[in-house]
Image (cartoon, grey):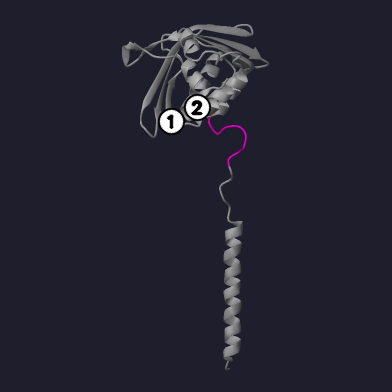
């Protein structure tokens, strides 16, 4: 049986349209990776069940450039007190430094293209026993090395601080951070590094 050329063209056109529709359907309904959540963080943090975890969460936050971890571990009534050197370098900058200013600072800092290596307490620091609803760590020494990924330049910070933790409900938070003084560079003990007060002064706002 002979099939006319018109019918052949019609069949070919129909087949082509069916193939196109199938392909388009595949594109439209193929699963894709979900968008990242607008709130929260994909970085894993320790539970806020004890002060040492809360302090270590700041280290995790720094090393992942994740402001959520900083925000989530600081009390709503947070206070920051700079050391005298940072205060002199940025006069007036630290007046009424509360949580809002602290989060503004850390978000500004994390927008920079940097890689951070942090160690939030010295190995020989004796962690005070947790009791009651407030715990004070005196003389804990932290260290931060921040490398600019564009210029490959480094800035290091180290300081001894008095940190006050407070229990709110079932979770601990950092209530007060008081920098006392800069500490020696681990790679060069003759060089005293600035505290993170200088970092706050640089990236914070009045």
Q: Quadrant of the C terminus?
A: top right
Categorize mark 2 by other alpha carbons within 10 Å: few (<14), some (14-19), many (20+).
some
Residue marked by disc 2: 109
- Residue 134 vs residue 141: left or right? right
- Residue 83 vs residue 72: left or right? left
Let me know if residue 45 appears in the view. no
At horizontal 40% and vertical 30% (from top left) the residue drawn is: 148
Give the answer, above or below, for where 7 lies relative to 169. below
Quarter residue 168 falls in: top right
Labelled pair 1, 2 in contact (Cβ < 8 Å): yes
Percent coordinates x, y for residue 196 in the rendering:
47, 17
Residue marked by disc 1: 114
**Magenta-highlighted stretch: main secondary structure?**
loop
Mark 1 or mark 2: whose residue is earlier in sequence: 2
Q: How far is mark 1 from mark 2, CA to CA?
A: 9 Å
At horizontal 61% and vertical 16% (from top left) the residue drawn is: 98
Give the camera-side residue of 187 and 26.
187
At horizontal 55% and vertical 34% (from top left) the residue drawn is: 42
Query: Which region of the structure is painted magenta?
Result: 36-44
Percent coordinates x, y for residue 15 in the rendering:
58, 76
């Amino acid at each position: 049986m002979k099939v006319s050329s018109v019918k052949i063209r019609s069949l070919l056109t129909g087949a082509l349209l069916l193939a196109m529709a199938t392909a388009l359907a595949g594109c439209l309904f193929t699963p894709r990776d979900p968008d990242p959540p607008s709130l929260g963080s994909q970085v894993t943090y320790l539970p806020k069940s004890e002060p040492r975890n809360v302090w270590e969460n700041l280290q995790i936050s720094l090393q992942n450039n994740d402001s959520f971890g900083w925000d989530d571990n600081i009390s709503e009534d947070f206070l920051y007190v700079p050391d005298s050197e940072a205060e002199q370098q940025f006069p007036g900058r630290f007046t009424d430094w509360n949580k809002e200013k602290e989060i503004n600072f850390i978000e500004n800092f994390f927008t920079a293209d940097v890689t951070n290596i942090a160690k939030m307490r010295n190995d020989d620091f004796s962690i005070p026993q947790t009791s009651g609803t407030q715990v004070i760590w005196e003389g804990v020494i932290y260290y931060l090395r921040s490398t600019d990924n564009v210029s490959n330049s480094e800035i290091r910070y180290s300081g001894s601080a008095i940190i006050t933790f407070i229990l709110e409900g079932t979770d601990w938070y950092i209530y007060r951070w008081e920098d006392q003084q800069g500490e020696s560079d681990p790679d060069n003990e003759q060089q005293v590094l600035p505290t993170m007060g200088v970092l706050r002064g640089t990236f914070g706002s009045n």
